């Protein structure tokens, strides 16, 4: 069934300070929804559409004059989220990380079957001994063997279920990380890449929260810009309240190089916001964190989640614990770089 919906937008307002266009989307029967268009190009009059509930990443071109009113018609398609599916890649990675788990589980099942068969035989012997008084002397030995069989079945059944529980938890975690790696990031106006493209290149730090939270995280990272970049850190600001954060870069002649480094640290932007929201909401739900709480997540070079928390990213701890990405220790110490 095609669930594509067409929307009509009302007036377009240009915010010259934040270089964004704010539109008001009117749908029926849902209430008005505010969307944001970023990266307005004054020369080509091109805009990049970003917001919740639409197909992102498409460039819309139309002439815009100061004080004019424009009407735009676009479409959005709802597609199922892959967050609840277990990918084959996650299963393969689980086998690689725990290569002997399947062997252990096979032997657990074999021992359970052996103990169950021995218990069945001991039970029939016990019934025969109870029915025949001449075999009464055999009852203690039969009960001993039956107890051993029941204990063995119980033990190996417990070990099997624990192993299976650990396997399911690992596969679920790897699947969530795989879903994260498939999410899209915008590097610039012309390039959109998946998170997986940065494996082995950058350590991502995702800052998810309202615009004020992202702005404050931006300010707190300023003194450590060089140190964070030396450690391969790149920030992904994910605004959850629909507002535009204030990321000011001082592009004076003296600070031009510093501003370029700051822009590089904060150059990434999430695309397909609904998919990012679904993934983030699932992470918060599993961690028992309120959906409204601002959080951060830091990734290792290989794309695994290193750590997460509520509040602002610990920039000082990242600088203290992460090894530089250049030199003979590149990648080797990434598994020993802390829990931030």
Image (cartoon, rainbow, N blue to C red):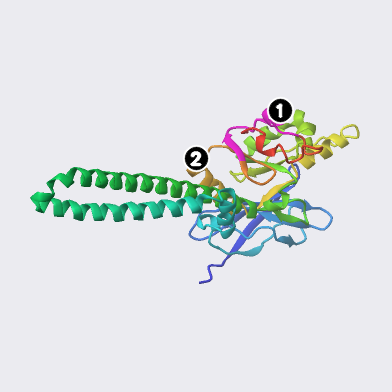
Residue 238, image x, y percentages: 64, 44
Residue 182 is situated, as x and y percent measured from the top left of the image, at 64, 55
* Badge 2 or badge 1: first in the primary sequence: 2
Secondary structure category for the residue under label 2:
helix
In this view, the residue farthest toward the right is 253
**Which quadrant is the C terminus positioned in?**
top right
Q: Position of residue 232 (x, y in %)?
A: 75, 40
Taking the magenta stretch, the answer to whether it contains residue 322 is: yes
- Callout 2: few (<14), some (14-19), or many (20+) C-alpha neighbours within 10 Å? few
Of residues 67 and 289, which is closer to you in this image? 289
Horizontally, residue 40 falls left or right of residue 143, namely right
The residue nearer to you, when weighing 70 against 191, is 191
Local secondary structure at mark 1: helix
The residue located at (19%, 42%) in the rendering is 140
Task: Answer with left or right where residue 32 lies relative to residue 336.
Answer: left
Q: Is residue 333 above or below residue 77?
A: above
User: Where does label 1 land, which residue?
Assistant: 320
Does the magenta run of residues contain 49?
no
Q: Where 183 sits versus 284, above or below? A: below
The residue where tag 2 is placed is 287
- Callout 2–callout 1 Cβ contact below 8 Å: no
Q: Quadrant of residue 159?
A: top left
Can the viewer see residue 320 in this picture? Answer: yes
**Magenta stretch in the rendered image:** 306-323
Distance CA(mark 2)–CA(mark 1): 26 Å
Tell me which corner region of the image, top left, top right, bottom left or bottom right, holds residue 192.
bottom right
Q: Is residue 296 visible?
A: no
């Amino acid at each position: 069934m095609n669930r594509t919906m067409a929307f009509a937008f009302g007036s377009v307002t240009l915010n010259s300070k934040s270089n964004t266009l704010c539109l008001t989307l009117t749908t029926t029967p849902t209430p008005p929804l505010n969307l944001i268009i970023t990266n307005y190009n004054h020369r080509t009059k091109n805009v990049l559409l970003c917001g919740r509930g639409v197909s992102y990443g498409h460039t819309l071109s139309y002439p815009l004059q100061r004080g004019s009113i424009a009407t735009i018609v676009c479409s959005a398609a709802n597609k199922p989220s892959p967050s609840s599916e277990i990918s084959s890649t996650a299963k393969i990675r689980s086998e690689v990380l725990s290569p002997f788990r399947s062997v252990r589980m096979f032997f657990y099942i074999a021992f359970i079957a052996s103990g169950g068969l021995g218990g069945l035989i001991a039970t029939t012997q016990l019934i025969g001994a109870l029915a025949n008084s001449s075999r009464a002397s055999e009852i203690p030995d039969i009960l001993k063997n039956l107890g051993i069989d029941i204990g063995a079945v119980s033990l190996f059944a417990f070990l099997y279920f624990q192993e299976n529980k650990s396997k399911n938890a690992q596969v679920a975690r790897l699947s969530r990380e795989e879903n994260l790696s498939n999410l899209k990031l915008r590097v610039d106006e012309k390039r959109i890449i998946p998170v997986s493209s940065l494996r082995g290149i950058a350590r991502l730090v995702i800052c998810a929260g309202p615009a004020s939270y992202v702005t404050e995280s931006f300010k707190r990272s300023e003194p450590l810009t060089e140190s964070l970049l030396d450690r391969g850190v790149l920030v992904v600001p994910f605004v959850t309240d629909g507002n535009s954060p204030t990321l000011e870069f001082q592009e004076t002649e003296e600070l031009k190089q510093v501003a370029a480094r700051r822009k590089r640290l904060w150059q990434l932007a999430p695309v397909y916001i609904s998919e990012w929201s679904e993934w983030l909401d699932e992470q918060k739900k599993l961690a028992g964190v309120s959906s409204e709480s601002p959080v951060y997540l830091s990734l290792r070079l290989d794309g695994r989640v290193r750590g997460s928390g509520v509040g602002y990213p610990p920039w000082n701890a990242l600088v203290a614990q992460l090894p530089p990405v250049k030199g003979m220790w590149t990648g080797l110490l990434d598994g020993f770089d802390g829990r931030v």
